Image (spheres, helix red, strand yellow):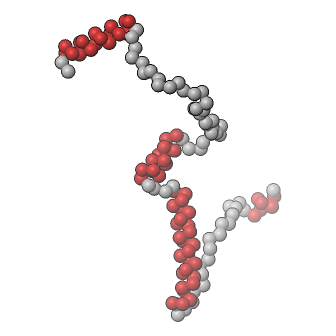
Amino acid sequence: PSEESTRSIEEVIRARCKDGLWDDVVRRAALKPTDFRPKPADLSLEKSDKGLGDEYAAAFETNVLGSKGADAVAKAHEEARALLAKLDSRLDPLFSFHYAPPPAKREVTIRTEAPAVSLEEK
């Protein structure tokens, strides 16, 4: 578009604004008041542990990158380890001339580093 056409368009717009001539869209049929009712939003008043940026990053990873959450991966690893240990315990007596018992499971113990005399005094 040339400068002349731009000026003429601007003049037409200014004239319509001064006269109040708006080219509003005319509805073909009026809206019925019962046609549209917004659904009530599900709002939670509890504060999230994760920030909004963390939630967006996790959603981006799952939707765009196709990665699973760290919890799902860790759970899958634990299941795989358990299945492998079970399989190993079944195959070991079949293929080994010297049978080895299954490995001991990890146990958590609480140890206090205080001397026994101080514990008895309390």
Most extreme residue toward the top, as rendered?
A: 18
Toward which corner of the image does residue 66 lie, by quadrant? bottom left
Image coordinates for residue 106, horizontal then vertical, percent: 62, 71
> Would you place residue 55 above or below residue 80 in this image?
above
> In the figure, 99 relative to 58: above or below?
below
- In-image side of 23 versus 51 (left or right): left
The residue depicted at 38 percent of the width and 6 percent of the height is 19
Query: Residue at horizontal 27%, vertical 14%?
Result: 9
Above/below status of 27 relative to 48: above
Compared to residue 120, the image places residue 19 above or below, namely above
Q: Position of residue 18 (x, y in %)?
A: 37, 6
Q: Measuring 52% from the left and 40% from the top, which residue is drawn there?
A: 52
Quadrant of the drawing holding the N terminus: top left
Tell me if 33 is positioned left or right of 8 in this view: right
Image spot of residue 44 (x, y percent): 64, 39
**From this viewpoint, which residue is outermost toward the front?**
29
Q: Give me the residue at 53% from left, 76% from top.
A: 84
Frontmost residue, 78 versus 105: 78
The C terminus is located in which quarter?
Answer: bottom right
| 9 vs 64, nearest the viewer | 9
Q: Is residue 87 left or right of residue 23?
A: right
Is residue 112 or residue 98 the one in the foreground? 98
Which of the two residues, 94 or 4, is positioned nearer the viewer here? 4
Marks counted in the figure total 0
Residue 60 is situated, as x and y percent measured from the top left of the image, at 45, 47
Question: As drawn, is 110 to the left or to the right of 91?
Answer: right
In the picture as drawn, the residue positioned furthest to the right comes out as: 121
